[in-house]
Amino acid sequence: MKILAFDIGGTNIKYALVSGKFKLSDKHEIPTEAELGGQHIINKIKSIISEYKDIDRIAISTAGQVDSENGIVVYSTDNIPYYTGMMVKRIIENEFSIPTYVENDVNAAAMGEAVFGAAKNDSDFLSLTFGTGVGGAIYINNNLYKGSVSSAGEFGHMITHAGGKQCTCGGEGCYECYASTKALIDSVKRSTGLEMNGREIFAENNFNKPEIRSEIDKWIDEIIAGLINIIYIFNPPKIVLGGGIMNESYIIDLIDRKIYNKLMDNYKNVNIVQSKLGNDAGMLGVAYLSSKI
């Protein structure tokens, strides 16, 4: 089986071919241009698909709350305007007549980690992905828990600062306003006047500057605050942290040094780990799910 897998994030769209043995090849990454809206993204996806022949499945991991049974984006914040209600599965299948599976990006990444990565052989864990926002997934009894309307795990929109920053969801003080990669980028820019991406912030010549390190450490404290809330609610055995920024070992190391001193004793069994699959988790997870349809 040959699967063409996509991972649509707020910043980039990644895509690759996935073999029947779930090996990735022909990997690419292009800007999402999310500000141009949902239809623009779908047009980009359609243009890419048209370049391939003999595809057996199309698998799409995407930001937004997704009804995977029907392949519909049931809700998207203004990170991707005009995306809510997009019937992705129907649009793609009508155009290409190829079976298509659509899943929320963090659910897809969690499934990738469950089958191939950091949570292999774990029946229960939580997954958080840090990027333009903060996404979450809940994996219980070897299954994704999606809630009553396919929207469970929106950890990025729990309120950590009452009356705080305005969020793209319409709320105030959401976790992702303080703990996302975008939040770190914004805080570094406010502090230093420098506009850098996450990779540049952690480059040695920047990372060692006291004013930048201070912003990084404050940002990690925000991540920890949200994780503690989640740990007290779910009492999970494992939490997998993903997103490109989590490749930086300093983040996990500092979380590990700080968080256990803040938890009640009977919650300290939680194991907080980096994604093993990195940016491939979403594509592998959604490809695996698509192979089951």
Image: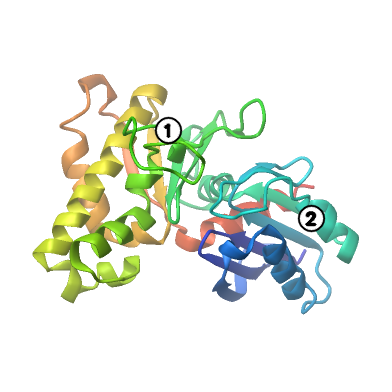
> What residue is shown with label 2?
100
* Residue under the image location 12 percent in, 62 percent down: 211
Quarter holding residue 222? top left
By what rule are the colours in the image chosen?
rainbow
Q: Earlier in the sequence, mark 2 or mark 1?
A: 2
> What residue is shown with label 1?
158
Quarter holding residue 7? bottom right
Q: Nearer the viewer, residue 275 or 150?
A: 150
Q: CA distance from mark 2 to mark 1?
A: 31 Å
Which three-letter amino acid code belongs to the residue tagged 2? Answer: Thr
The percent coordinates of residue 38 (x first, y second) are 67, 58
Left or right for 248, reference 257: right
Left or right for 250, reference 5: left
Which three-letter amino acid code belongs to the residue tagged 1? Answer: Met
Left or right for 184, reference 166: left
Residue 126 in view of the camera: no
View extreme (left): residue: 210
